[in-house]
Image: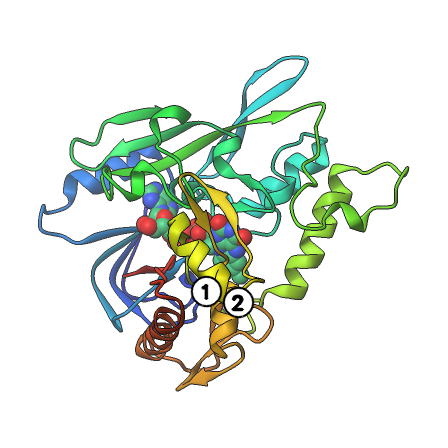
Amino acid sequence: MRIEHDFSLLQYNTFGMKAVARHFVEYSSIAELQQFLRSCSPDERVLQIGGGSNLLFTNPVFEGTVLHSAIQGMEVMEEDENTICLKVGAAVVWDDFVAFVVAQGWGGAENLSLIPGEVGASAIQNIGAYGVEAKDLIRNVYTIDRKNYSERVFENRECGYGYRSSIFKNSLKDQYIVTHVSYELKKHPVLNLSYGNISAAFEPGKEITLQKVRDHIIDIRQQKLPDPKVLGNAGSYFMNPVVSVALFEALKHDYPDIPSYPAGDGMKIPAAWLIQQTGWKGKSLGHAAVYEKQPLVLVNTGDAEAMDIIRLADAVICAVEEKFAIRLKPEVIYV
Ligand SMILES: Cc1cc2nc3c(=O)[nH]c(=O)nc-3n(C[C@H](O)[C@H](O)[C@H](O)COP(=O)(O)OP(=O)(O)OC[C@H]3O[C@@H](n4cnc5c(N)ncnc54)[C@H](O)[C@@H]3O)c2cc1C
């Protein structure tokens, strides 16, 4: 077990906040995690993180213990003619897992290429992109209960998955630590190219491989999204709001071009479009800016403090609410 004190979290948050953890503990096995939890005082504030790619540290010092998994490894749990089920350690970098399965010719994860972060968080966040979500692949989530240190394995259907959401972000928030996730992949993949214009990138009649899909998605993402190593950010800052059909109809009357997708009983509107209409795209406030190529992303233009990001987010939220009567909610988690 690695234990550090007054530990810089700069490498553990993609926004590039200069936060420090009073204590930092990295465990390499379930036994080490259980040992840490047993030794922990009930009043101790403990935050489990992955790669910190969806977090905003709002204080310069986290007064507690930041926990990080170093549980690596992939093992085959089950395999038949059509599918293979892999159990993967929470600390495996998500995109390393995607690269590996694509190289094996196992389908299902390719549309989720290049999403930052680790395997553990994929099951908490239900990461998604290009018409696919982690929930489409997850079979089981292996956890440790923070209260009694026992192991519990969740079936996919028990995880309450929804848009960027799961039971672990709602009724079971902060109660379980993910140690492994198992994913089911297809040996005879059916490609999902229906989202946006992915299919337009491929010549009709030519074979489309998993690797080609992955390469194309990496290409689009690199063009559209800022690299956190260059411009600190946490991906989409806001969720896409779902509004009632009545509100949507009223908006459509005033804005005939408003994009939308049916979502349950309501309509989902791309937050990026709403922000663009307010004129905030590309604008900055203090050391934070609305990314010029994708207004859903807020960036640290250099030396930003959390307040710079929060002030800008609030300004965007107010502008959207004033214009459309829709209140955007942050997807980024404030710590
Ligand atoms: C440039 C960029 C692009 C992005 N694009 C996308 C995208 O296309 N789609 C998408 O869905 N997301 C996207 N994101 C957001 C981010 O990649 C995901 O939310 C990712 O799952 C976060 O993983 P992480 O390991 O960094 O988790 P962290 O940010 O460290 O943590 C996220 C949450 O998970 C919890 N957590 C982490 N690990 C564990 C564990 N082992 N056990 C229990 N709880 C845990 C944390 O407590 C926290 O609540 C993007 C981010 C960036 C910076």
Label 2 CA crowd tier, 10 Å (few <14, some 14–19, many 20+): some
Colouring method of the image: rainbow
| CB within 8 Å, label 1 to label 2 | yes
Q: Is disc 2's CB within 8 Å of ligand 1?
A: yes
Residue at 65 percent of width and 45 percent of height: 195
Q: In front here: 196 or 326?
A: 326
Percent coordinates x, y for residue 322 in the rendering: 35, 73
Say what amino acid the circle numbered 2 marks: Pro
The residue pinned by badge 1 equals 14
Work out whether residue 51 can be spotted: no
User: Does residue 108 sit above or below 267 in this rendering?
Assistant: above
Residue bearing mark 2: 228
User: Is residue 181 shown to the viewer in this render?
Assistant: yes
The correct choice, above or below, for 173 with respect to 82 in the image is below
Labels 1 and 2: the sequence-earlier one: 1
Q: Is mark 1 within 8 Å of ligand 1?
A: yes
Give residue 63's position: percent from left, percent from top.
18, 63
Q: Quadrant of the C terminus?
A: bottom left
Name the side, left or right, on which 206 lies relative to 289. Answer: right
* Element on which disc 1 rests: loop
- Say which of 241 and 224 sits in front: 241
Q: Is residue 255 left or right of residue 203?
A: left
Question: Left or right: where does residue 206 sit relative to residue 19?
Answer: right
Mark 2 element type: loop
